[in-house]
Image (spheres, coloured by chain):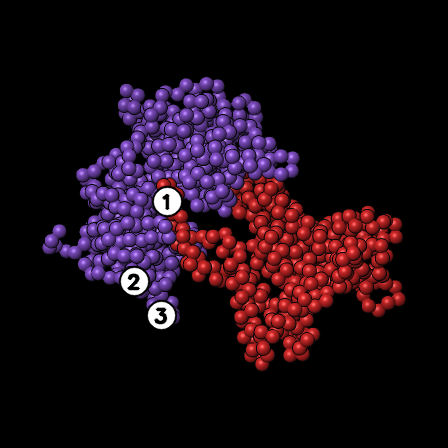
Amino acid sequence: MANPGGQLPAWADIVMLPLINVAMAFIVSGIIIAAIGQNPFEAVRIMILGAFSYDGALGYTLYYTTNFVFTGLAVAVAFHAGLFNIGGEGQAYIGGLGVGLAALALDGSLPFILLLPVTIAAAALFGAGWAFIPGYLQAKRGSHIVITTIMFNFIAAALMVYLMTQVLIRPGQMSPESRVLAEHAWLPFMHEALGWFGIAAARSPLNLSLLWALACCVLVWLLIWHTRLGHEIRTVGSNQTAAVYAGIRPDRTIIVAMCISGGLAGFVGVNEILGVQHRLLLDFSAGYGFTGIAVALMGRNHPVGIVLASLLFGALYQGGAELAFENAAFTPDLIVVIQGLVVLFSGALGFMFRPYLERLFARPVPPALAEA
Amino acid sequence: MTGGPPPAIELRGINKRFGPVHANKDVSLRVPAGTIHGIVGENGAGKSTLMSILYGFYEADSGEIAIFGETMKIRGSEDAIAAGIGMVHQHFMLVDVFTVLENILLGAEGGALLADGMAAARREITRLEEEYGLQVDPDALVGDLPVGLRQRVEILKALFRGARILILDEPTGVLTPQETDQLFRVLDTLRQQGVTIVLITHKLREIMAITDNVSVMRAGEVVANRPTAETTREELAELMVGRKVLLEVGKRPAQPRRPALEVEHLTVIDEKGLRCVNDVSFTVRSGEIVGIAGVSGNGQSELMEALSGIRSIDSGEIRVNGTRVTPVRPTDAKRMRQASLAHVPEDRHRMGLVMPFEASESTILGYHDDPKYSGMVFMNGRAIVADTAGKMSRFDVRPRNPFLKTANFSGGNQQKIVLAREMERHPDILLVGQPTRGVDIGAIEFIHKRIVEMRDAGCAVLLVSVELDEIMSLSDRILVMFEGGVVGEVAATDADARTLGLMMANIVPDQETAEAGHG
């Protein structure tokens, strides 16, 4: 009875609230676009066409989506353990390093069928390792995970610059890149894979990582809601005292959850290094880790929501790029503004409209009725 | 009714609906000025809703409110304060890192610069303290004060804002018996000074002790108004629940058998380095209930936590059925569970349940490793839900919905979920802390019966409660704890509230009393 607003029906909470948030972001974006003298409806048309309709557009959208699914899942798993992992960026970066190192070391000796699991494992291992340290510090020393994961993003960036300029750079070359991986190590592009079945598709960076991302969604769903570990993670995340009472060790659970989270973020490396770039280079994590936070918030930390939110952000990335390409008035900065507004409304202000919606649906079940 | 001063509060035909729930049905209430008026009712009977309407948190759908004879609309707490209504919430609204003075001043600073307001407030508080006997150091940090004094700060806050009507929502839920007595003395003084007090509670003993009149609410309606002097606990209980309630626990004499739980020289040192449990030794036999009496904060909670493997012990030994189970790791609740020791924790919100979980998930808390619930990799969701449904029907948990969020059950039903979970393991030893705290009266009867049934089935029960009545009516033997140590033991048949009270304060009963007790 202390909560007069009560609760929202699940569908309103999961579907309506995010839609309202996105709509608000678009309305504000529209006002900004109108303010610079452009037609917002034309902009929307170009973005939608650019994200879904042009040749290869859908491929690009889904390629971005793949990255967001990985980082979104990463944030969600940590969140279920009560941890705010904002180090997805660094974990993705280091995960990619793992993929690159494994592939560079083994592409001469292993066939693709063996190389693939090894590189995927390397991505998970490196990403998990990078998340392990903040997890350990949180669990054993109480260092706040938000602070440590932010710092580890910077450390990851610095480490990568050092490695790419001093250690892994291809000899006799100016740009900080490794040698190109042997072609058999590449993860097939989706348009190639579809070609095997006689389906013609436009070229795009979309590759088979998407399937792995969807598999990860299922695995995370099973993990969180259908395994003992998931039960333990959620118990620790909701109530640590109750966890101790239940004989669950919060420290161990926190570390394990962070490692799983980091591993998932690390899979961005599979998509980027093995799927698209085919070499190790700088800055391939490109903010996917940060956007993953908004994706997870918007997707309510549930794999289905995360897929949908990833799709939205994928479309925004691709449609925005198309918009900048079509109309010079839409500078890349403006696209960032639009993306930023979506992040703002669905992430930072994600619950702004909740009270209004709750009032609309106000239907608490006080114990009086519950007893009846 | 005619003539005389107008009543302090008059509510006429108040209705409030939340969606399909009719939380207040045509409620009318008259509280004469300068009296203490009790409102009793089970959890969810609509007491808090009614007071929230009076204090402006909700607006009534229909009905009238008159304060000191003046009909008014109360749209927010500012209106209520302006009308002279103050509220002391069940959960205190204080800033721990502020001093008492700063807390009282909060929201009533009276200007941009604090200094003037502070000086004026200090004078005013001194006056209030003297007038009402509300001594509290204005410069103490609220976080350092015991709960009873924090509540006093809340009362001062209300009076400082000019309250002539004071609403107290379950004020004794967090207090020790001594603090409760002090509160009642304060309330009595306030009444003598002409303050009108509305006391919301579900503890009938308190109603009988302090109020002038009492209104009983059930399912959103006021079902009875009585002058306190003309009613009894039994009558009120019946009115609250709508049927006859047994306030006494019916049980046969215990038949203790072999020792189940043996504790030797147990010492626990808390976070502050205090010996909160100090060299405690005792035995609980199967088939008996041993109660631990004591003013809360004398080591009972820590003892229970140490025995259940939640709190690390410093030295000593714990044996279950003759086997040494002293924890090796600092906390290892799992090991104690495996030794057939179940624990109903004192604080079900903080420890015994996970509020955002579905009931079925809270029902396996601590037992999720059980092969009954969990296969090699995946949990067996169907088995868990079926098991929960069974427990819910056997323990009469309402609503009988395993998928409902734990937080959405009432206090009594939440407690039944915990009890069902722990009792249905058929443990050799059951630790029970505050089994009926915040539980309404119908459920108390049920819970007490179950605890006695456990005993009769051969379980060794160790009970901690701040309710002395509960300890005395349930226990077969009573241990008294004081400052971490066990200072005495009494057979339940020899126990009376006075002797126990003295032992709880560590005053050894004099020879005469002791002899009288045996005679």
Residue density around tag 3, few if under 14, some if 14–19, many if 20 or more, within 10 Å: few
Q: Residue furthest front?
A: A198
Q: Quadrant of residue A322?
A: bottom right
Give the x, y percent position of residue B84: 26, 59
User: How many angstroms separate mark 3 from mark 1 (CA)?
Assistant: 46 Å
From the image, state the color of chain A. red
Give the x, y percent position of residue A273: 77, 58
Q: Nearer the viewer, mark 2 or mark 3?
A: 2
Q: Are marks 2 and 3 in contact (CB under 8 Å)?
A: no
Tell me the residue that label 1 is attached to: A369
Q: Which mark is residue B79?
A: 2
Callout 3, which amino acid? Answer: Gly
Instruction: Tell me: B264 left or right of A263.
Output: left
Instruction: Tell me: B74 left or right of B401.
Output: left
Q: Nearer the viewer, mark 3 or mark 1?
A: 1
User: How many angstroms separate mark 2 from mark 1 (CA)?
Assistant: 30 Å
Q: Nearer the viewer, mark 2 or mark 1?
A: 1
Give the x, y percent position of residue B246: 30, 30
Residue density around tag 2, few if under 14, some if 14–19, many if 20 or more, within 10 Å: some
